[in-house]
Image (spheres, rainbow, N blue to C red):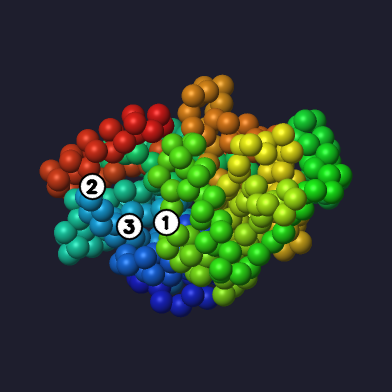
Amino acid sequence: MEIREITDKNVWESFLAGAAEKTFLQSWNWGEFSQNMGEKIWRLGIFDETELIAVALVEKKVTKRGTFLLIPHGPVTINSNPPTGGPNYKSQILDTLTKRLKDIAVEEKTSFIRINPIWERNPENDGFFKDFRLAPLQMHPESSWKLDITLPEENLLAEMRKTTRYLIKRAQKNQDIRIDQSRNLVDVEKFSRFHDQVSQRQRFVPFSLEYLQKEFRAFAPDDGVRLFFGYHNNEVVAGSFVIFWSGIGFYHHAISLPRYAKFSIPYLLQWEAIKEAKRRDCHLYDFWGFVDPQKQPRHPWAGPTLFKMGFGGQADEYVKTRDLVLSPKYWFTYLLEKLRKVKRRL
């Protein structure tokens, strides 16, 4: 196996179109977003002779807690009949990628490599990371709630939790409620104002307006992003930031004002986003982060997860985020992130 940088968007996206397990964090547009945020990136392709069998978008993170390389939800591998390598081809891909990343880390003076591919969490996949240690903090979801949306709308409604279905229909009948979509960049500022309020209630650090605007800009040229706003008497009370990419709709950011909870507007808003994904011929709707509410009832994501589960679907759990330590400086980052995890009750 060998690694070459990929500079052609069509080559990159064509490979990902054929991969079953993927998220937009490995998309070409996410790489553009990262660069616009001032990060250095590498788009690496792993080849078996002439066959492209895996890709990895690599980001250089320069933060107050440390400098490191991050492979968000990657590498993405082919999903059947690898050209060579047999059942351990993922291990070979990871070894080949790690060697290249170590060289980049030396050149870029980073203290560790962080990786969290969306490979199924099982003993075999966990075993590939014998040289890595568990990261103190995840940067992107290690599990997600997903819904197959290939069924007709009436079937999707029938498979929802009874309460969820009732709340959607009740909101549809309320003439004071409406759901609008926006593809206009200026509306990101409106979304950001409410996002700040939600972050205070759910105890997470909000994404900045600049972050949201640049993420929107990155996917807008391919018509891959929509803002959904839920209104009650012309006042915004709920919203979502949804990315549509490679046949999947991703519920990436959300806002909801608790004083309007009795109107159940987020339920209708989510249903409208799912229907938009179906109109775009998406086969999957990814609700993003998931925690088991029974195992972690006090986790900040427990409540949002119960909301997501009401629409039907299933959880996908990925291998835990791993770090490859390259420098003693790593332990400063490790300590700060452990403290942050405790503070946020994660």
**Which amino acid is tagged 3?**
Leu
Tell me which numbered mark, 1 or 2, is placed earlier along the sequence. Answer: 2
The vertical placement of 222 against 322, above or below, is below
Quadrant containing the C terminus in the rendered view:
top left
**Which amino acid is tagged 1?**
Ser
Instruction: Name the side, left or right, on which 284 lies relative to 78.
Output: right
Return the mark for residue 208. 1
Gap between marks 3 and 2 measured at Cα = 25 Å
On the question of residue 87 being in view, the answer is: no
Residue 202 in the image: x percent, y percent? 49, 36
Residue 324 in the image: x percent, y percent? 25, 45
Which residue does the image show at 64% across and 48% down from the upper left?
Answer: 238
Nearest the viewer among 250 and 260 is 260
Instruction: Name the side, left or right, on which 336 lies relative to 32.
Output: left
Tell me which numbered mark, 3 or 1, is placed earlier along the sequence. Answer: 3
For the residue carrying disc 1, how many other residues have a C-alpha within 10 Å: few (<14), some (14-19), or many (20+)?
Answer: some
Which residue does the image show at 77% across and 30% down from the upper left?
Answer: 163
Tags 3 and 2 touching, CB below 8 Å: no
**Residue hosting label 3:** 97
**Residue hosting label 2:** 65
The vertical placement of 91 against 104, above or below, is above
On the question of residue 185 being in view, the answer is: yes
| Secondary structure beneath label 3 | helix
Residue 127 in the image: x percent, y percent? 37, 37
Foreground mark, 3 or 2, reads: 2
